[in-house]
């Protein structure tokens, strides 16, 4: 009976064990929550380990100085070997992100295992994008939202991936640990500076450990005593924006000559010059709305590509809309062309008044076209703002400098065998830009000038 009872117990025990080893797959939501709690846990652990590492050195020096009465220099010299071993754990060699076995290495490894399903040993089911805030889960961590804040620090960077987040996290935790360190040890800068003097000869004698520890020590001292005056001045908050230093900081639109890539065009105007105000905000007083004039990016032949003024106008309108200069037919763009019955100056509304700018925002003609005067700047940019590759290349016009028809206009833009007056793109000459000579035959491809009405 006892044997049977034992057998039953063994079977039941084995069954229970089998049930316990059944793996239940966690949901992405559950592993994302575990990622968040893991980060909080590992952050506390990292800060504690960093402090204990440095305190393993400073604590001993403090005891010898304050309790045993040794002079600081003597106390530091007697603990130099111990401090080398402690500081060695903080050293990061060139090309490495953390020393193997160091607090930083453990932090990175444990967070990636909890948060990155592609990391070795990870049980995560969520995607890295769910951590950054660009994934598919309804609720995400949105670590990517920290990007601008992380980048505002001197040692910061963008949070475009999990490595960027862990790097920012390590940086901020390290700074917080150092702040705690100098608060606990008011004489930390003094003692660590003496330690530098004690370790330097060891490094000079060829000790690799001493050399690595010295690098870690100097990184620490430079962080807690930034102005090298022997007193701690560590600052872990983002540096305040300084308007007038020529660098665009958070909260500033611009700073001095640095407009952060802005121009009148990007700010919604068509021409002018953007400046930066004394308050580091955009000054758009030099910006204004001008009508646009451009040369087409494509070349066209008569009558294959167009055979009337209306078809040429349609080419200009299509080019303008494809470049975002117009939409749904407005504003209207027309070709700078005349035929036997119509002058360009009469068929393009508003062409004789106002200011015209190219697609880069530079004024090409003040006071309108048709006055016979030189241009302010040659029309060399196409609808996309790309410079005409063949500067001084030919452009169909059939129009003189006063905006009137010439005798040559491809037989009213219907015959490829006829000739036409052509302009020369890029020139400002009062005549050359629109009547620079005769091009024959009209079947040869040429570009068009396009003008905005208004």
Image (spheres, rainbow, N blue to C red):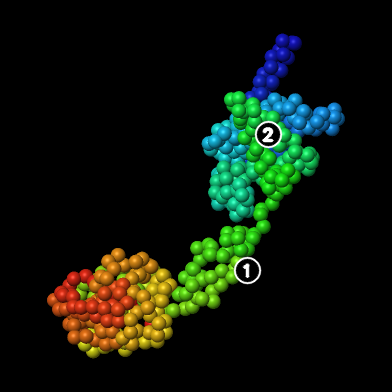
- Give left or right: position of 193 versus 263: right
Looking at the picture, how far across and down is residue 180, in whole percent? Answer: 76, 42
Q: Residues within 10 Å of mark 1 (few under 14, many from 20)?
A: some
Q: Residue at x 35, y 70 (%)?
A: 381
Q: Earlier in the sequence, mark 2 or mark 1?
A: 2
Q: Residue at x 38, y 84 (%)?
A: 368
- Quadrant where the C terminus is found in the figure: bottom left
Total labels drawn = 2
Looking at the picture, how far across and down is residue 190, in whole percent? Answer: 75, 38
Q: Residue at x 39, y 74 (%)?
A: 358
Q: Residue at x 56, y 65 (%)?
A: 256
Q: Using the rendered image of the protein, determine whether residue 109 is visible from the camera's viewpoint.
A: no
Foreground residue among 136 and 394: 394
Residue 279 circle label = 1
Asked if residue 431 is positioned above or below residue 223 in the image, the reply reads below
Q: Nearer the viewer, mark 2 or mark 1?
A: 2
> Which element carries disc 1, helix, strand or loop?
loop
Residue 196 circle label = 2
- Give left or right: position of 140 versus 50: left
Q: Using the rendered image of the protein, determine whether residue 411 is visible from the camera's viewpoint.
A: yes
Q: Residues within 10 Å of mark 2 (few under 14, many from 20)?
A: some
Residue 27 falls in which quadrant of the image? top right
Asked if residue 180 is positioned above or below residue 337 in the image, the reply reads above
């Amino acid at each position: 009976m006892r044997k049977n009872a034992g057998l039953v117990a063994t079977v039941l025990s084995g069954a229970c064990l089998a049930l316990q080893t059944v793996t239940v797959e966690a949901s992405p939501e559950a592993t994302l929550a575990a990622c968040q709690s893991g980060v909080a846990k590992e952050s506390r652990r990292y800060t504690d380990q960093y402090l204990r590492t440095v305190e393993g050195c400073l604590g001993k020096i403090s005891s010898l100085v304050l309790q045993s009465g040794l002079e600081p220099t003597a106390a530091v010299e007697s603990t130099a070997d111990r401090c080398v071993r402690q500081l060695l754990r903080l050293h990061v060699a060139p090309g490495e992100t953390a020393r193997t076995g160091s607090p930083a290495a453990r932090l990175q490894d444990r967070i990636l295992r909890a948060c990155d399903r592609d990391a070795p040993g990870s049980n995560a089911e969520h995607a890295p994008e769910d951590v950054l805030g660009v994934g598919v889960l309804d609720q995400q961590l949105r670590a990517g939202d920290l990007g601008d804040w992380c980048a505002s620090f001197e040692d910061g960077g963008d949070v475009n991936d999990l490595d960027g987040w862990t790097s920012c996290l390590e940086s901020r935790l390290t700074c917080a640990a150092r702040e705690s360190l100098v608060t606990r040890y008011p004489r930390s800068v003094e003692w660590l500076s003496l330690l530098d003097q004690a370790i330097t000869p060891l490094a000079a004698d060829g000790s690799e450990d001493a050399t690595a520890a010295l690098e870690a020590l100097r990184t620490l001292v430079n962080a807690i005593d930034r102005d090298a005056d022997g007193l701690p001045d560590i600052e872990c908050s983002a540096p305040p924006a300084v308007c007038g230093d020529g660098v665009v900081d958070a909260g500033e639109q611009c700073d001095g000559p640095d407009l952060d890539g802005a121009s009148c065009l990007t700010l919604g105007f068509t021409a002018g010059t953007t400046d930066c105000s004394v308050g580091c905000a955009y000054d758009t007083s030099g910006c204004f709305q001008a009508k646009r004039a451009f040369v087409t990016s494509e070349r066209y032949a008569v009558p294959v590509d167009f055979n009337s003024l209306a078809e040429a106008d349609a080419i200009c309108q299509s080019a303008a809309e494809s470049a975002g200069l117009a939409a749904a037919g407005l504003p209207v763009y027309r070709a700078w062309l005349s035929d036997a019955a119509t002058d360009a100056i009469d068929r393009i509304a508003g062409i004789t008044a106002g200011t015209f700018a190219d697609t880069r925002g530079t004024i090409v003609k003040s006071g309108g076209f048709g006055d016979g005067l030189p241009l302010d700047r040659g029309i060399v940019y196409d609808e996309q703002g790309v410079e005409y590759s063949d500067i001084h290349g030919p452009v169909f016009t059939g129009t003189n400098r006063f905006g009137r028809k010439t005798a040559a206009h491809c037989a009213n833009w219907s015959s490829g065998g006829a000739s036409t007056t052509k302009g020369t793109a890029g020139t400002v000459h009062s005549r050359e830009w629109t009547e620079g000579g005769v091009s024959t035959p009209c079947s040869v491809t040429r570009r068009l000038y396009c003008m905005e009405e208004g």
